[in-house]
Image (cartoon, rainbow, N blue to C red):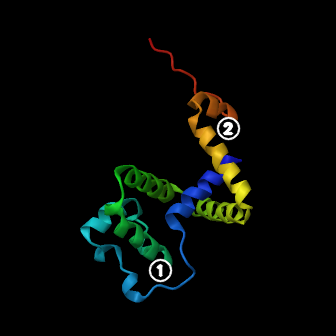
Amino acid sequence: MAGKYFAALIASAVFWAANVCAAPEANPQWAQLSAEQQKVLAPLAKEWDTLRPWQREKMLDIARDYPKMNPQQQQRVQQRLDRWSRMTPYERENARKKHEEFKALPPEKQEELRRKWLEYQRLPESERRKLRGETPAPIPDTP
């Protein structure tokens, strides 16, 4: 269950935005972004020009704040942007819905799920696979 909410947390941390239309000047095409903005937002390069104005505005806010972040925060942003860019539209929509469900939970339940997620992250990968119901990949025979 925590894994489902993790995807929603990723999506929300990176893409949460108000339901307000952006001004035209806040809706630049990819080619109009500065080199620094393009570097930070590189995982979104292929789809940038198809993003909604509010999504672009949120991404520009992230790019603006990026230099002020410590290296760990910058790495987290890059990982989340990369994960998001690899998601299908269906996966993104599911992540948004899960985020909405998470936000509708009482604060105590949210905190409990966060705690469980942290516990899960501390587990060795083999234990995580068991919890996910995955079988380990077979080790190839070497001649």
The residue to which callout 2 is attached is 132
In the orientation shown, which residue stands out farthest toward the front? Answer: 108
Relative to 96, is 109 on the left or the right?
right
Asked if 40 appears above or below 129 in the picture, the reply is below
Measured Cα–Cα span from mark 2 to mark 1: 37 Å
Q: Position of residue 72 (x, y in %)?
A: 39, 49
Q: Position of residue 6 (x, y in %)?
A: 61, 51
Asked if 137 appears above or below 143 in the picture, the reply is below
Image quadrant occupied by the C terminus: top left
Q: Position of residue 103 (x, y in %)?
A: 68, 64
User: Measuring 55% from the left and 61% from the top, which residue is drawn there?
Assistant: 11
Q: Please name whichever residue, 83 or 70, is drawn nearer the observer in this view of the structure.
A: 70
Q: Residues within 10 Å of mark 2 (few under 14, many from 20)?
A: few
Q: Residues within 10 Å of mark 1 (few under 14, many from 20)?
A: some
User: Measuring 73% from the left and 55% from the top, which residue is drawn there?
Assistant: 109
Give the residue type that dot 1 points to.
Pro
Q: Which mark identifies residue 53?
A: 1
Instruction: Say which quarter of the image contains residue 123.
Output: top right
User: Measuring 40% from the left and 59% from the top, which residue is drawn there?
Assistant: 43
